[in-house]
């Protein structure tokens, strides 16, 4: 059922506009994105969120500044970090998502970060990402391995090999 929503016009007057539920959902998404943008612009929280599945330890970054803080904080430690460069429209990325969450649960001492290449294209460019998914394994701020493509076994064996090595 359409819901009348006040829409600002010139001055302080409002006119009702009929928005279908589908359009209303996209408006909500637009407002959420704008809020996220404004928060990141003004330094607010919420830019690094645990991914949808709260039990795993995958952090999705939506702000360049938050990503840099995270990267810098781990560049001083020997902790392994796996950076998942993906896109929401990428089929192989979606195929790898359960594997990444599983690895994050299996290796709690490893930091898993997710970067959407469309949201943070500068970060993807900085890492030379040319295909998705791309997984970059890092220690002390340096790349130690890279997996390009949906290669579950290769990713798991590299995480297994490097998570305890110093």
Image (tube, rainbow, N blue to C red):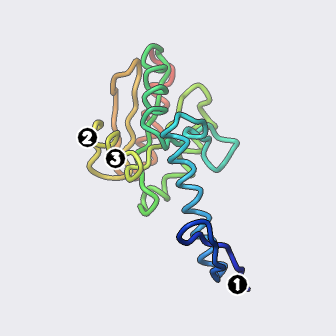
Secondary structure of the residue carrying numbered label 3: helix
Which residue does the numbered mark 2 point to in the structure image?
A: 128
- On screen, residue 148 versus residue 77, left or right, reads left
Which label lies toward us, 1 or 3?
Answer: 1
Viewer-side residue, 20 vs 114: 20
Q: Residues within 10 Å of mark 3 (few under 14, many from 20)?
A: some
Q: Nearer the viewer, mark 1 or mark 2?
A: 1
Q: Position of residue 151 (x, y in %)?
A: 40, 49
- x%, y% of residue 65? 44, 32
Q: Which mark is residue 2?
A: 1
Q: Secondary structure at mark 2?
A: loop
| Location of the C terminus (image quadrant) | top left
Secondary structure at numbered mark 1: loop
Q: Looking at the image, which is closer to me, 79 or 150?
A: 79
On the image, the x and y values in percent for residue 92 come to 42, 59
N-terminal label among 1 and 3: 1
Q: Give the side of residue 10 with respect to residue 53, left or right.
A: left
Q: Residues within 10 Å of mark 1 (few under 14, many from 20)?
A: few
Residue 121, label in figure: 3
Per the model, the C-alpha gap separating discs 3 and 2 is 10 Å
């Amino acid at each position: 059922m359409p819901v009348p929503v006040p829409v600002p016009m010139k001055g302080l007057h409002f006119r009702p506009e009929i928005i279908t539920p589908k359009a209303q959902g996209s408006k909500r998404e637009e407002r959420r994105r704008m809020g996220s943008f404004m928060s990141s612009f003004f330094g607010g929280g919420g830019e690094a969120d645990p991914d949808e599945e709260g039990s795993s330890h995958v952090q999705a970054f939506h702000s360049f500044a938050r990503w840099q803080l995270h990267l810098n904080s781990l560049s001083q430690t020997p902790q392994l970090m796996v950076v998942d460069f993906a896109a929401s429209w990428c089929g192989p990325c979606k195929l790898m998502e359960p594997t990444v969450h599983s690895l994050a649960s299996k290796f709690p001492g490893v930091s898993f970060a997710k970067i959407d290449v469309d949201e943070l294209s500068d970060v993807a460019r900085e890492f030379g990402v040319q295909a998705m998914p791309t997984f970059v394994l890092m220690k002390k701020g340096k790349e130690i391995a890279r997996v390009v493509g949906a290669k579950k076994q290769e990713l798991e064996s590299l995480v297994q090999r490097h998570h305890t090595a110093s």
